[in-house]
Structures are given as structure tokens and as C-alpha cells.
Image (spheres, helix red, strand yellow):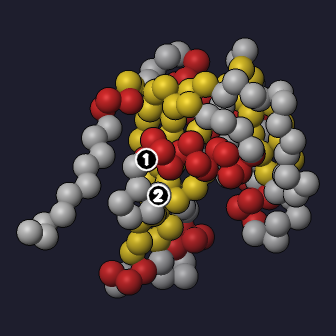
């Protein structure tokens, strides 16, 4: 496989939970297959962007909620199956998933093209894998509920200039 087809994408996302229920979203009429599946707010990290600030912006843009990250749930590496690789490329995403506070959860108005649902861990485990944006969603939910997470200070974001 050539290096041009070997790309790794870095994402930031938020797993939002209230009383054992997780908020998942999808955009059924988007025309982009991945967005028609249930998932959490997720966006791409831009070069030089602070991951903690980026996830706040992702949640605000995706579902209109203020989000205050309190913990890093984990860093998850997801490589798509062989069907995606048959085209000669590898779809590999590394995601930093955060948990935190979302005080205005019941007061926001969702974008008209967005569906939101509440799922507990059992629901997530029973959903057909083809209907989830990421196969590791149940694992993330279980990690969160068992308090397997990291303080935000495990992330170090440094920008420097080598110019005099």
C-alpha cells in the first residue's frame, strides 16, 4: 500500500451522559452514510488546535450545547474493516473522547436535520453495529460508567515557534 493512501485522522468527541443515559445523534437526511448512524458529537482536530477547546466547539456546533470537559475518557483507535481497505486505502481514526458537564441539556433547540436519542449501555449493546457510527461506543459507555477516565491534565498542548 502506498503512503498516500495511509492516512490517520485525529478526532475529538464528547460522550454526554445523564443518569445512565447517553445522548446520541444522527442526521438521517444528510446523504453521508456515516452521519445517518447513531453517534456522539465528533469533529476533526485542526493543526495547532487545543483538543479541550476543540471539543467544546464541536459540541456547540453539533448540538448547540455548552460543554465543559472534566475528564478524558480515553484515546480510541478505530480502523475500518477490510471492505473499506479494498479500495487501496486504510480508514484509521484516532479519537480523544471527553466527558464533562452540559448544564443546558434540556433547554437547547436542535438543528432541524438532527435526531437525538437517549441510550443506556444495554441499548447500545443491542443496537445493530451497522447503526452505530463507531463500533466502540458500548465500550466507551461502559468505561464512563465504571469511572475509568483520566484528568484533563494528562493532556499537554504546547504551541511553539522556532522563529527568532
Q: How crowded is mark 1: few (under 14 residues within 10 Å), some or many (20 or more)?
A: many
Rendered image quadrant of residue 46 = bottom left
Residues tagged 1 and 2 counted as in contact (Cβ below 8 A): yes
Say which quadrant the N terminus sits in.
Answer: bottom left
For residue 157, above or below residue 22: below
Pinpoint residue 13: horizontal percent, then vertical percent: 56, 45
Depth check: give the residue in front, 121 or 56.
Answer: 56
Residue 96: in sight, yes or no? no
Q: In this view, does 141 lie to the left or right of 122?
A: left
Q: Residues within 10 Å of mark 2 (few under 14, many from 20)?
A: some
Depth check: give the residue in front, 159 or 112.
Answer: 159
Pinpoint residue 162: horizontal percent, then vertical percent: 13, 66
Residue at horizontal 74%, vertical 44%? 64
Q: In this view, does 5 lie to the left or right of 118?
A: left
For residue 68, above or below residue 5: above
Residue 4: in sight, yes or no? yes
Furthest residue in direction front, as rendered: 164
Does dot 2 land on a helix, a strand or a loop?
Answer: loop
Q: Is residue 155 left or right of residue 109?
A: left
Pinpoint residue 38: horizontal percent, then vertical percent: 75, 47
Residue at horizontal 42%, vertical 80%? 5
Count of labels in the image: 2
Find disc 1 in the rendering and name its residue.
51
Depth check: give the residue in front, 1 or 10.
Answer: 10
Pinpoint residue 17: horizontal percent, then vertical percent: 67, 25
Name the N-terminal-most of marks 1 and 2: 2
Depth check: give the residue in front, 119 or 58.
Answer: 58
Find disc 2 in the rendering and name its residue.
45
Furthest residue in direction left, as rendered: 164
Q: How far apart are marks 1 and 2 (CA)?
A: 7 Å
Residue at horizontal 51%, vertical 73%? 85
Amino acid at each position: 500500500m502506498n503512503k498516500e493512501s495511509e492516512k490517520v485522522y485525529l478526532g475529538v468527541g464528547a460522550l454526554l451522559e445523564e443518569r445512565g443515559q447517553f445522548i446520541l445523534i444522527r442526521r438521517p437526511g444528510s446523504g453521508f452514510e456515516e452521519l445517518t448512524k447513531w453517534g456522539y458529537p465528533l469533529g476533526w482536530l485542526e493543526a495547532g488546535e487545543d483538543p479541550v477547546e476543540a471539543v467544546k466547539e464541536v459540541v456547540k456546533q453539533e448540538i448547540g450545547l455548552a460543554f465543559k470537559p472534566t475528564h478524558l475518557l480515553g484515546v480510541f483507535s478505530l480502523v475500518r474493516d477490510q471492505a473499506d481497505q479494498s479500495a487501496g486505502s486504510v480508514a484509521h481514526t484516532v479519537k480523544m473522547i471527553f466527558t464533562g458537564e452540559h448544564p443546558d441539556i434540556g433547554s437547547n433547540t436542535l438543528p432541524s436535520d438532527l435526531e437525538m436519542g437517549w441510550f443506556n449501555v444495554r441499548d447500545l449493546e443491542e443496537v445493530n453495529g451497522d447503526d452505530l457510527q463507531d463500533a466502540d461506543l458500548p465500550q466507551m459507555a461502559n468505561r464512563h460508567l465504571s469511572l475509568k477516565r483520566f484528568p484533563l491534565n494528562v493532556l499537554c498542548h504546547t504551541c511553539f515557534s522556532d522563529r527568532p
